[in-house]
Image: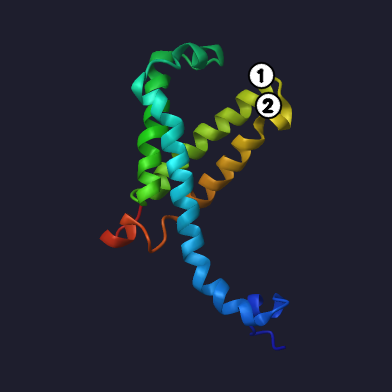
């Protein structure tokens, strides 16, 4: 094989599936973005109904004033999830979601003393949102449809 051969072709045990992988690449990425966005909306739905409801919990973690941080958390999860789902302002919405998830990693691992087992889901979700903060929404997004990305 020459050095100019595509890395994927060189490494596939069954090179014949390359076409399938290439064809499904963007669809799989879109499905991940939509599922992650819907999960974030679902998680934020209860918070958006009572935007100050998490104020006490946030102050317990040292985020003062809770009346400022609680609605910000609610909006980030609910509206950020909608933006991620449709792929509009994908990068800033995903970055904000990633920050929220990194705070929950700290809360579970350090503040609540649960270690990795308590923070595991938050780590995975933070990594997913990091991916979209860097990658954007791909061609199946509102960002692509309007021809502008952040």
Q: Are marks 1 and 2 in contact (CB under 8 Å)?
A: yes
SS assignment at label 2 = helix
Residue 4 is drawn in which quadrant? bottom right
Q: Secondary structure at mark 1?
A: loop
- The relative height of residue 97 versus residue 118 in the rendered view (above or below) is below
Judge whether 61 appears above or below 79 on screen.
above
Residue found at x 65% / y 76%? 7
**Residue depicted at 42% across the width and 20% down the height:** 70
- Residue where numbered disc 2 is placed: 109
Q: Looking at the image, how many numbered discs can be counted on the residues? A: 2
| Cα distance between the residues tagged 1 and 2 | 6 Å
* 20 lies left or right of 45: right
Left or right: residue 35 versus residue 126 is left
Q: Position of residue 130 (x, y in %)?
A: 53, 47
Above or below, 113 against 128 in this view is: above
Q: Residue at x 55, y 12 (%)?
A: 60
The residue that label 1 is drawn on is 112
Q: Residue 102 in the image: x percent, y percent?
A: 57, 34
Give the residue furthest to the left: 146
* Horizontal relation, residue 101 to residue 68: left or right: right
* Residue toward you, 58 or 29: 29
Vertical placement of residue 130 versus 75, above or below:
below
- Residue 49 in sight from this viewpoint: yes
């Amino acid at each position: 094989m020459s050095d100019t051969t595509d890395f994927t072709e060189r490494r596939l045990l069954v090179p014949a599936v390359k076409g399938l992988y290439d064809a499904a690449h963007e669809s799989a990425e879109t499905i991940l973005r939509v599922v992650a966005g819907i999960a974030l909306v679902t998680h934020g739905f209860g918070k958006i109904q009572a935007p100050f409801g998490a104020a006490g919990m946030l102050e317990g973690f040292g985020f003062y004033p809770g009346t400022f941080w609680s609605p910000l958390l609610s909006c980030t999860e609910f509206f950020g999830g909608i933006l991620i789902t449709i792929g509009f302002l994908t990068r800033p919405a995903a970055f904000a979601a990633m920050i929220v998830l990194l705070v929950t990693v700290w809360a579970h691992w350090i503040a609540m003393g649960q270690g990795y087992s308590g923070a595991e889901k938050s780590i995975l979700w933070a990594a997913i949102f990091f991916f979209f903060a860097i990658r954007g929404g791909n061609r199946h997004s509102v960002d692509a449809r309007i021809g502008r990305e952040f």
